[in-house]
Image (cartoon, rainbow, N blue to C red):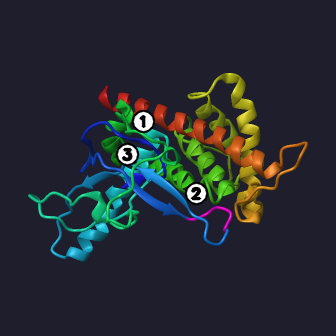
Amino acid sequence: MNAQPDTRTLADVTALGPVTLTPTGQHICEWLPGSDMRIGWRRRATTWPVFARGSEPSYDPITALQRARVPLRRACALLSLALNDCWDARLGPHPLPADQEPPPVQHYPHVLLDPDGTAPELGQDDGGGPPTGLNLPAEVAAAWPVLDANPKLARAVEAFYEGMKLRSVHPSVAFMMYVVAIEAVGNGLEERTLCECCPDCQAEVGAQRRFRLALAKAVPKKQVHSLSASAYRYRSLTAHQGQLHGPEASMGIPAYTTFQVEPTRAFRDEDVAEMRAASRGVLLWALANTADQADR
């Protein structure tokens, strides 16, 4: 699996729960779809993948492969959270004997080969140079048992990951998923309360308050109000009315004007990035805080 596209990778072999991640030390060059849909136009991207390895016991190989996708996806989600870029599985899972090493990455699909059968050299368009090796934050490295013990937090991490996967093509939905991840953490910070309009009302209240409580764990106090205002303005319109705020209606291409920023471009570049950073900070805080409570 690999980020798309980036020049960062893991610095060393890393274990995330039952999944062992091994940097390949090799780059993959591949053609990506052109964002403006011009016929014949393509762009090349370079990534530095890692191999993910684990085991899933089963008498049925098909069942084992299906089950293996669950921890693989969580590993992708935690890598995306830790390295702040979207990681995804490009191939697999597939059976491999315990004593057999995976073949070189050039033997896998998605690899762009030169006419002589070799992968092209890195160029300026690819970012150039060797990858930057990064280590996982301690709270992410120890996150697997924390998520196993806390399904609500696990769902919050999943929501953040969905936002990362959707960020370029569906920014309005990505924004909503970042907000959902923060809400999920906030729901664990205080008791849920019911509306008191009548004895039979079962509606819950205080969602925005809990959202702000979670935000305050990761962003400066002066940002809490502005982020909360934009969160519920955009999120509610998308969730309840299906309104899109980014350039989805023009198939991903924002309109440009001479004297002002086009609204859909501002939404994608500013609001989504800001909410993504806040969501990531809240989740990292939650992982560290939950792990500390479990140790005591």
The disc label shown at residue 146, or none: none
Q: Which residue is mark 1?
A: 287
Name the dominant secondary structure of the magenta segment: loop
At label 1, the amino acid type is Leu
Q: Which residues are magenta?
A: 33-37
Q: What residue is rendered at 78% in x and 62% in y? A: 241
Q: Residues within 10 Å of mark 3 (few under 14, many from 20)?
A: some
Q: Nearer the viewer, residue 198 or 90?
A: 90
Q: What x and y, as percent, mark residue 217?
A: 56, 28
At label 3, the amino acid type is Leu
Measured Cα–Cα span from mark 3 to mark 1? 8 Å
* Residue 213 versus residue 181 in the image, above or below: above
Q: What x and y, as percent, mark residue 281?
A: 53, 33
Pointers 1 and 2 in contact (CB under 8 A)? no
The disc label shown at residue 166, or none: 2
Q: Residues within 10 Å of mark 1 (few under 14, many from 20)?
A: many
Q: Indicate yes or no whether the magenta region holds residue 36.
A: yes
At label 2, the amino acid type is Leu
The secondary structure type at the circle numbered 3 is helix
Q: Say which quadrant the N terminus sits in.
A: bottom left
Q: Which residue is mark 3?
A: 147
Q: What x and y, as percent, mark residue 46?
A: 44, 51
